[in-house]
Image: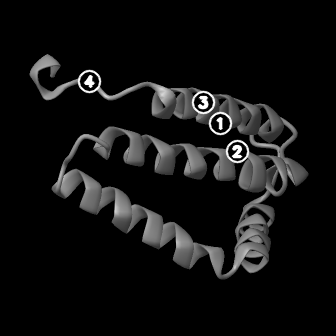
Amino acid sequence: MIPFTTAQFFAVFSAYNETIWPAQLAAVSLGAVALLAIARPNARTDQIVLAILGVIWAWTGGLYFIAHFARINPVATLFGAGFVLQAGFLALGVSIRPRPPEWR
């Protein structure tokens, strides 16, 4: 059994989207940058994509799960912490030097 109603669940989405507007435009832009980086790979592609994923993961963990969803589901704080931890791992991946093409 879930600890919230459908109405509460949709209210979280509404409140979250109202709170972060117009950041959704930045999120779409980041997604486009990641897709362009993948479409035209270079020595920095891995780092660019990992950095973008790290930002999105940290945002989701902190601003969605912890700041909004935890209001109706206390376990969301753990989900959020997990996302933030994973964002740290993605950041670690950004800090690692890219492998030469012959190693791939």
What type is the residue that disc 2 sits on? Gly
Residue at which label 3 appears: 86
Residue at which label 4 appears: 99
Q: Measuring from the top left, give residue 7's x and y in whole percent.
A: 77, 68
Q: Which of marks 4 and 2 is nearer the N terminus?
A: 2
* CA distance for labels 4 and 2: 29 Å
- Where, quadrant-wise, is the C terminus in this rendering? top left
- Quick check: marks 2 and 3 in contact, CB under 8 Å? yes
Q: Within 10 Å of the Cα at label 2, are there few (<14), some (14-19), or many (20+) other Cα atoms?
A: many
- Quick check: marks 1 and 2 in contact, CB under 8 Å? yes
* CA distance for labels 4 and 3: 22 Å
Q: Which of marks 1 and 2 is nearer the N terminus?
A: 2
Residue at which label 1 appears: 83
Q: Which of marks 2 and 3 is nearer the N terminus?
A: 2
Instruction: Classify mark 1: helix, strand or loop.
Output: helix
Q: Which of marks 1 and 4 is nearer the N terminus?
A: 1
